[in-house]
Image (cartoon, rainbow, N blue to C red):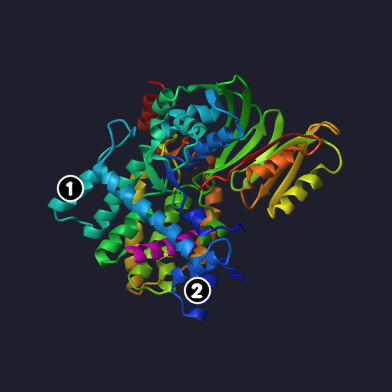
Amino acid sequence: MSLTIRNAGDAMAICEKNGWRLHETALAYELAKGTESREDILTRMGRHFSAMQESIKAGLVGTEEGACKMFRDDAKRLMAYREKKMTLSGQTMTKAAAYALAVMEINCSMGRIVAAPTAGSCGVLPAVISASMETLSKGEAEGVQALLTAGLVGVIIGKNASLSGAEGGCQAEIGSAAAMGAAAVTEMAGGTPKQSFDAAAIALKSMMGLVCDPVAGLVEVPCAKRNSTGSAIALVSADMALSGIVSVIPFDEVVMAMSKVGRTIPVSLRETAEGGVAATPTGRRLKQEIFEP
Amino acid sequence: MQDYSLFDIIGPVMIGPSSSHTAGASKIGHMAAQVFEGEIAAVEFYLHGSFYKTVKGHGTDKALLAGIMKMEPDDVRIKDAFNIADARGIQYRFFEADLGEVHPNTVKIVMTGKDGHVETVVGSSIGAAKILITQIGDTDVEVDGDYCTLITTHIDKPGMIAKVSTILAQHRINIAFMKVFRQNKGDTASLIVQVDAFPGSDVLKEIAQIEGIQSAKMIRALEG
């Protein structure tokens, strides 16, 4: 069996033809590779889902002093704040933001995470999916379905643009993760495949052009907080699509545009730590303190 | 258009913070340890310029050493690699080096066994936790760790490849990819065969007994 999915148009046509939801098309795409059975794919994705949940839990407990070089306990701060105060951006969004920080703290402290699509953007999907699951009272099965859908959106971005900060800037990493998360939770909340891709398009447009400028070349500043705000963009994009708002520019065209934008981002702003906030006086000072103390 | 799996996007499960500088580094170490025959007593890592410069922030040193101790890229003990190596009596040192015209994230690993024999492996972390072993001893190779891989060195003469592939066929082992390298005609050549299943030690023994084969090694595929 062959299943050609080059873009969102192909994926939506397959959903339409078979009466499938996006995660079912994603599963069929992986099955068509002929290397793993349906059960094996679901079991493996289930393990990745569990590893994501574990990374959130561990991050909320916290890490040892010095495990991360430039931040610590931000997830705990945000969780404590949202439990005591009326938040401005709402309970789901602040929770997702805290979860993303938690996973990023585990990542930089040499803990176990799931690259999704990369280690530098590993906070977004666990955050967006877990926070939505809790708000919508969904279980692990829906969480795994969300990862299948997110994976398919990532496959499409990878095929037509890039998922690497060195190639396409931060838009290719956290931007892609936000688009993947937006599509996944739109489906989880009952949205159609078209609404999922509208959500993904809105998220990706909102992060288009974002540069990759890690201070001292480490996956900490501004990456951790960008995972948080990327999660927020994913959630609000999903809500917009679920309300019936459509992306004027279709997802496939947004991906093409993102690919072109990525190629025009100067090398100094693509993971080389030579530009952006990495090149600010504080960014340079931190680099020196860490590497040449 | 690259043919992605969903698991290329959601995964691997790994120890952070960097797929290339941490997960990839541990995979290179793991591959080197598989190439080595016997127990490793001491290991020296020569890291190419830019790879060396960010060692500290990404735990590249711990990941490489953990790999030498055959830990997988998602092993939570990676961050304790120094203590574990100390407890096992494995000596380790890290150096900055100029390895020439290589991928920026390249390391040369020199391992010494308890019996005193030395083996060298050069590998690069080429992005997204993918790696490429480019040199084993004096032999140029290309091994990526995605498949079980048979590596032979043999005298460069007609019929060697046929003999090896015949033995694999007799044991119903399917060849996925195959490459041959040689320094000079008639000199030592090496054959890299990526296969779909890990062959038993009897298969390896049979291949090692082919006339003209100098060495035969089997490396397991890496997880993730």
Q: Are marks 1 and 2 on the same chain?
A: yes
Query: Looking at the rendered structure, which numbered label has been put on residue A42?
Result: none
Q: Does the magenta run of residues contain A149?
A: yes
Q: Residue furthest front?
A: B202
Q: Earlier in the sequence, mark 1 or mark 2?
A: 2
Give percent across and percent down for residue A63.
28, 37
Image quadrant in which you'd find residue A238: bottom left
Subunit ID for the residue under disc 2? A
- Left or right: residue B94 compared with residue A190: right
Name the residue type under label 2.
Met
Residue under numbered circle 1? A80
Residues at circles 1 and 2 in contact by the CB criterion of under 8 Å: no
Image quadrant in which you'd find residue B118: top right
- Left or right: residue B207 compared with residue A143: right
- The image quadrant where one finds the N terminus of chain B is bottom right
- Residue A44 or residue A186, whichever sits in front: A44
User: Which residues are the magenta region?
Assistant: A140-154
- Give the SS element for disc 1: helix
Residue under numbered circle 2? A12
Residue at left offset 54%, top offset 41%: A267
